Amino acid sequence: MISYLNGKFLKKNDIYISPDDRGFLMSDGIYEVIRSYQGHLFQSQQHIHRLNAGADALQFKQTNFEVLIEIAEELIKINNLSHKDSTVYMQITRGSVPRSHRFPSLETPLTIYVDTKEFFPKMEEIKNGVSAILVPDQRWCRCNIKSISLLANTMAHQQAIESGAQEAIFLRNGFLTEGSHTNVFLVKNNIVITPPKSNYILSGITREVLLDCCHDLHIPVEERPVVEKELFEADELMIVGTTVEVTPVIKLNHQTINKGTSGLITTKLYEHFKTTKLYHDQQ
């Protein structure tokens, strides 16, 4: 496989990152994951906009990475993924310098890495649903930045796996924030509800697409704080994200949601989401 590093297309096995890279030493970096459907990047401009915002928030010397879309498209072609589903991973760190808490000089080149690989969606989970557990949200207070520092997320996700679930859903002071790698929606009385944008959640690209789907289908939406008990009282519960798309949650802390099946609105939203993908791919 061919990847991209700092201006060059290289065999992935030939790529080496300096041990002084600030991403390696201090998690001083940001990333994005973009889905490609049959060679067409989905919502690429929105992903790059979020990447640029993260670079600005972290005070990187460069804050416009529009060129990475062209690089991603080239990698898809080079790696013979034009007629397959794949993911593109982009990571940018503050560069390689001797370890110090202080930012390096602005002359320090950023480390820019892009990789792509074939992706196989978990269609059985999307159709039949998954289990989730609730965990305390112990992350930092800038979750709106897509930072490569994911230790709390990975520990929560591993806790879910070890409990027989597929996702961990965070609660901060009794309020829903998001999943370890997803956004969370619930349905009550035919109203779709999700927490509002804040520094405690990452504003997911799929989240925004799903809100547009609700508008298209004339489904009422409330973006508001959600307390823990509402999750168990929900008629439907779902996680959404780049890799999970729209996946129903049928068990939460081993309690069955919606009789253990995907709900009507969840199914409608997923079907419309698929139409949105198809329309996008044809452009």
Image (spheres, rainbow, N blue to C red):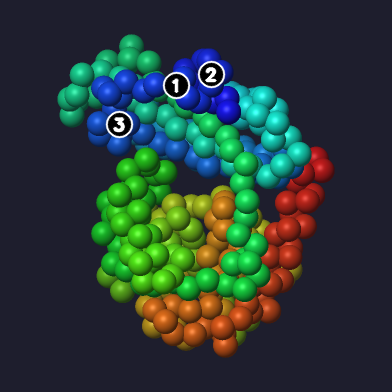
Q: Position of residue 214 (x, y in %)?
A: 67, 66
Residue type indicated by callout 3: Phe
Mark carried by residue 143: none
How many discs mark residues in the rendered view?
3
109 relative to 227, above or below: above
Q: Secondary structure at mark 1?
A: loop
Q: Is residue 9 above or below residue 175?
A: above
How much space separates mark 3 and mark 1, taking CA atoms?
A: 15 Å
Q: Residue at x 68, y 67 (%)?
A: 269
Q: Amino acid at mark 2?
A: Leu
Circles 2 and 1, Cβ within 8 Å, touching? The answer is yes
| Element assignment for label 3 | helix
* Mark 3 surroundings within 10 Å by alpha-carbon count, few (fewer than 14), some (14 through 19), many (20 or more): some
Disc on res. 15: 1
Camera-near label (3 vs 1) is: 1
Q: Give the amino acid at mark 1.
A: Ile
Give left or right: position of 35 versus 61: right
Seen at 34% across and 25% down, the residue is 94
13 sits to left or right of 23: right
C-alpha gap between disc 2 and disc 3: 20 Å
Picture quarter containing residue 81? top right
For label 2, the crowd category at 10 Å Cα-Cα, with few meaning under 14, some 14 to 19 and many 20 or more, is few
Give the number of the disc on residue 24: 3
Instruction: Reply above or below: 11 against 130.
Output: above
Q: Which mark is residue 10?
A: 2
Residue at x 71% of width, y 71% of height: 268
Can residue 183 be seen in this snapshot? Answer: yes
Quadrant (top left/top right/bottom left/bottom right) for the N terminus: top right
